[in-house]
Image: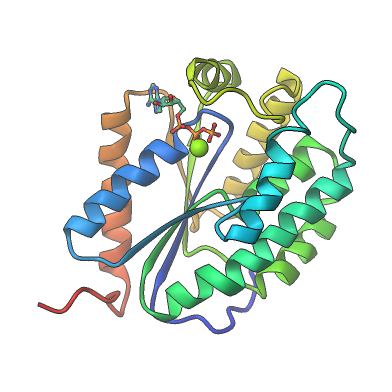
């Protein structure tokens, strides 16, 4: 657990899981609900979340890294670029929003780096933890929702999406299995922060569970997060 510097009264919630596990769908659903209830909500994602970081995302996930002839990316290079994005995102977007009392909902964060670059690519987990701490200045999520489901189900959903496949979708099933196991390992290490949800049921069933966890979490907070003034 890192020391939280510059943290305001907001709440930081991250959404994690393998490709196609439903992160983006569930994040959008709970964002809408919280806004309707008067919370100030920031929806954001990684890698990306600022204009500069989104440019790095494009290099990491999209073309030309997409084309079969593209230069392979070294795992350390991939990790460094993701962490570079994270520093920019935390400093420019997440911390300011938390200081203003927002509920920040982030699609992937530090756990994805440990799961993908650590468990998936085999980079040293303790090095990645240190680098995460460096990139985030010690910011850790207050709550993490981990959507777990079998790899073939997630990849099958991804293949049906019109947005096409990214560089990571084309990794071997074994890579994605390591990532899935990595996420579950992290959840076992941080049982209070990371809540594991079954990603297989229909979206509305999962949304009800997400809603219940998030609302209970917000209610239990000592200081209520900022609401719009009537
Ligand atoms: N519970 C569900 N059951 C069936 N299909 C779902 C479910 N949740 C989301 N989907 C569909 O599966 C696809 C992937 O969902 P979504 O984009 O939310 O996942 P994700 O975890 O954000 O994926 P990615 O890692 O690719 O960003 C989408 O087409 C979405 O409509
Ligand atoms: Mg998504």
Extreme residue toward the left, this view:
230
Position above or below: 18 against 165? below
Residue 37 falls in image quadrant: bottom left
- Quadrant containing the N terminus is bottom right
> Could you tell me which quadrant the C terminus lies in?
bottom left
91 is higher (above) or lower (below) than 28: below
Res. 132 visible in picture:
yes
| Residue 123 appearing in the image | no
For the point 71% across and 51% down, the residue is 56
Q: Residue at x 49, y 31 (%)?
A: 21
Q: Is 120 on the left-hand or right-hand side of 39?
A: right
Residue 198 at x, y = what percent? 43, 31
Q: Position of residue 106 (x, y in %)?
A: 48, 54
At 55% from the left edge and 84% from the top edge, which residue is drawn?
6
Ligand 1's quadrant: top left
Can you give x and y, in whole percent of width and height, for residue 204 in the image? 26, 31
Residue 108 drawn above or below residue 40: above
Q: Is residue 7 left or right of residue 51?
A: left
Image spot of residue 195 (x, y percent): 46, 47
Q: In this figure, which colouring scheme has been used for the structure?
A: rainbow
Where 41 falls versus 205 (above or below)?
below
Number of marks in picture: 0
Image point (30%, 43%), residue name = 29
């Amino acid at each position: 657990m890192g020391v939280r510097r510059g943290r305001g009264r907001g709440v930081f919630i991250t959404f994690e899981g393998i490709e196609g596990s439903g992160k983006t769908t569930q994040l959008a659903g709970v964002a809408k609900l919280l806004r309707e209830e008067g919370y100030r909500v920031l929806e954001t994602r990684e890698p990306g979340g600022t204009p500069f970081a989104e440019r790095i995302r494009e290099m990491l996930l999209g073309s030309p890294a997409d084309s079969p002839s593209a230069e392979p990316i070294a795992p350390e290079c991939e990790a460094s670029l993701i962490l570079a994005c994270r520093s920019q995102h935390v400093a420019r977007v997440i911390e300011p929003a938390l200081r203003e009392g927002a509920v920040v909902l982030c699609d992937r964060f530090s756990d994805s780096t440990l799961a993908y670059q650590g468990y998936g690519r085999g980079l040293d987990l303790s090095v990645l933890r240190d680098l995460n701490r460096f990139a985030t200045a010690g910011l850790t999520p207050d709550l993490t929702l981990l959507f777990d489901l079998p790899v073939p189900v997630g990849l099958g959903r991804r293949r049906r999406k019109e947005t096409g496949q990214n560089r990571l979708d084309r990794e071997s099933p074994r890579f994605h299995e390591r990532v899935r196991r990595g996420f579950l390992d992290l959840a076992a290490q941080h049982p209070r922060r990371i809540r594991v949800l079954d990603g297989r049921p229909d979206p509305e069933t999962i949304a009800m569970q997400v809603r219940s966890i998030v609302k209970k979490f917000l209610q239990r907070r000592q200081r209520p997060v900022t609401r719009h003034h009537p």
